[in-house]
Image (spheres, rainbow, N blue to C red):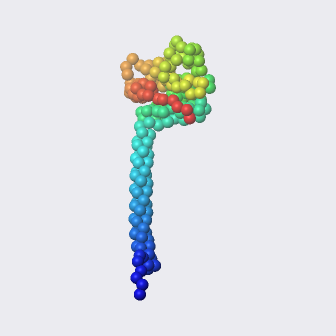
């Protein structure tokens, strides 16, 4: 009988089978680990998105927006002025008020323009804006420039006679005077926090 050296066909088949089993087991472990990592990443991403949405919702309760489509802008309002309302005035301006003032007295409706207005101007060095004393930009240093137009919020009622009838007419302060003063104080304390953005 002859003696044979090396592997025979059966030996090669055994080696291939062992390699296939080891390779298959390795691939199975790899694919399960990859799937688990993707699920963990998705869960983390979803949690992160949920956290961001919750933070945004919290911020939205602190601030709200008033969209003024006629001008293509929106006012970002502090929470204290979230009841801000607007309407076009007879002069074509955008008048502002708060729902609290409107509920207090119909003389404070935004269309009357006697509480506040959106001031617009194109030339910062001109003096054609409502209630401008000096140049437009000196009068409204916080005006937002959107496109070629500047926009600013002006609360005229802070400087003019009250919009509500029967307020401030008595020498002694009445309950109506106190309520009106309280609503106006909230506006005074917060109107400078209003920011203007493009819609």
x, y percent for residue 28: 42, 66
**In the current view of this chain or complex, which residue is farthest to the front?**
2
x, y percent for residue 2: 42, 84
- Looking at the rendered structure, the number of numbered marks drawn on it comes to 0
Nearer to the camera, 131 or 111: 131
The quarter holding residue 73 reads top right
Residue depicted at 47% across the width and 37% down the height = 64
Q: Can residue 28 be seen in this view?
A: no
Q: Can residue 19 be seen in this view?
A: yes
Residue 37 versus residue 94 in the image, above or below: below
Nearer to the camera, 124 or 165: 124
Residue 35 versus residue 121 in the image, above or below: below
**In the current view of this chain or complex, which residue is farthest to the bottom?**
1
Nearer to the camera, 163 or 33: 33
Residue depicted at 44% across the width and 77% down the height = 13
Nearer to the camera, 166 or 8: 8
The quarter holding residue 122 reads top right
Residue depicted at 41% across the width and 80% down the height = 4
**In the current view of this chain or complex, which residue is farthest to the top?**
134
Residue depicted at 46% across the width and 21% down the height = 158
Q: Quadrant of the N terminus?
A: bottom left
x, y percent for residue 142: 48, 22
Q: Quadrant of the C terminus?
A: top right
x, y percent for residue 105: 49, 29
């Amino acid at each position: 009988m002859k003696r044979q050296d090396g592997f025979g066909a059966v030996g090669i088949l055994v080696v291939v089978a062992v390699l296939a089993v080891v390779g298959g087991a390795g691939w199975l472990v790899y694919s399960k680990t990859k799937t688990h990592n993707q699920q963990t990443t998705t869960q983390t991403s979803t949690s992160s998105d949920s956290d961001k949405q919750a933070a945004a919702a919290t911020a939205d309760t602190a601030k709200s927006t008033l969209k003024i489509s006629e001008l293509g802008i929106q006012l970002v309002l502090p929470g204290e002025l979230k009841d801000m309302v607007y309407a076009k005035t007879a002069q074509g301006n955008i008048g502002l008020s708060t729902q609290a003032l409107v509920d207090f007295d119909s003389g404070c409706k935004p269309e009357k323009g006697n509480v506040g207005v959106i001031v617009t101007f194109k030339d910062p060095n001109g003096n054609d804006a409502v209630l401008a004393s000096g140049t437009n930009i000196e009068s409204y240093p916080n005006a937002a420039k959107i496109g070629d137009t500047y926009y600013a919020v002006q609360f005229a009622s802070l400087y003019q006679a009250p919009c509500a009838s029967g307020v401030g007419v008595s020498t002694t302060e009445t309950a109506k005077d106190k309520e009106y003063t309280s609503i106006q104080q909230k506006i005074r304390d917060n109107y400078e926090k209003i920011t203007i953005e493009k819609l």
